[in-house]
Image (cartoon, rainbow, N blue to C red):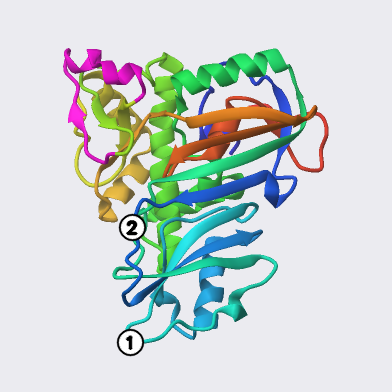
Amino acid sequence: MNELELLGPRAHGLACGSAVLKASAEDFQVDEVLDIPLAGAGEHLWLWVEKRGLNTEEAARRIARAAGVPLRMISYAGLKDRQALTRQWFSLHLPGKSDPDLSGAEHATLSILKQVRHSRKLQRGAHAANGFTLRLTRLDADRDALQERLTRIAAQGIPNYYGLQRFGFEGGNLAHARHFAERQTLPEQRNVRSRVLSAARSYLFNRVLAERVGAGSWNQAQIGDLLAFTDSRSFFMAGEAECGDPRLAILDLHPTGPLWGAGASPAGGASHALEQDVAAGEQALADWLAEAGMAHERRILRLPIGGLTWHYPEPDILQLEFVLPAGCFATVVVRELVDLLPAGQTDNPCVF
């Protein structure tokens, strides 16, 4: 499947040009933003880790081996890209134990920058946001058009699509999900089960969002929409008064789309009809997610981009810095700007 099938249309017009992302790990830097005061004492050892060209799961395995503890004793808030330079938190459960020697985990690809004790383990999704520094290299784009586009997305946000990473190479995770959905069975391996369920939910969400982008309603509240604040998982129904809430205009409040699970969509009006139509078009996936015990949740349709700044360190390099809520994808920000070339290619971008 191609990008347009997995995500959907752009909201702000055609790409302004082309560029390469991730020619090196330093071109895609991520810093986890964790708003948790650490106690300095307790049976959990928290680690601030920098990794390069290494995925989160492998980093956890290295830490577990060095500490001499089972992998289940290692926790982290979220998965980070392999092809990147990332800094994120891990925690080790060490009841009654002193701090282990973790030098065996360190390598050119992994450095432990800080160690702090705390009373609780690090929970999945505990980080508030991620800070990004991206370098788009081999840039071939009109600067005036980029300036206008960057200014616009800073003010208006972008569609909050799940990025291509969620679906695997050429949509392989989604194809795997369809395989199980057709049989209404689940993979035995926990990590595989999590991956395919997530791909299916993300795809159905993207299908709803793509329809809203096509209709021009992705950033507007409709009667019957379920609205949520940027950093909240709770939501409330939009009536006529809520559709005029000034917090919508300043990107604090947003319409939401469905993360499929058991039970009917709680949305109303045209939003409910759209969500039911998408589910009907992918009935096997929708039924499979409900039977898997997934709870119905919501995700904001519009993604506000915090603190967006940009400059050109070299004529053919655009550097971007911004902050996104946890669970959102920096690549969908880039997608509203340029078409991405493979790192070894200099022309003929893949246009979707």
Q: Which residues are magenta?
A: 232-251
Q: Residues within 10 Å of mark 2 (few under 14, many from 20)?
A: few
* Vertical relation: 333 (above or below) 48: above
Q: Is 23 situated left or right of 47 in this image?
A: right
- Which residue is rendered at x = 53% and y = 29% of the image? 308
Which label belongs to residue 37?
Answer: 2
Q: Position of residue 328 (x, y in %)?
A: 45, 40
- Which residue is rendered at x = 31% and y = 75% of the image? 42
Q: Nearer the viewer, residue 133 or 1?
A: 133
Which amino acid type is shown beneath numbered disc 1? Answer: Gly
* Residue 311 located within the stretch drawn in magenta: no
Quarter holding residue 267: top left
Q: According to the image, label 1 marks what residue? A: 96
Which amino acid type is shown beneath numbered disc 2? Answer: Pro
* Vertical relation: 261 (above or below) 190: above
Q: Determine the secondary structure under disc 1.
A: loop
* Residue 236 located within the stretch drawn in magenta: yes
Quarter holding residue 253: top left
Q: Nearer the viewer, residue 136 or 211?
A: 136
Q: CA distance from mark 2 to mark 1?
A: 22 Å
Disc number lying in front (2 or 1): 2
Q: Position of residue 81 (x, y in %)?
A: 57, 53
Q: Position of residue 330 (x, y in %)?
A: 54, 38
Which quarter of the image is occupied by the C terminus? top right
- Which residue is rendered at x = 62% and y = 25% of the image? 337
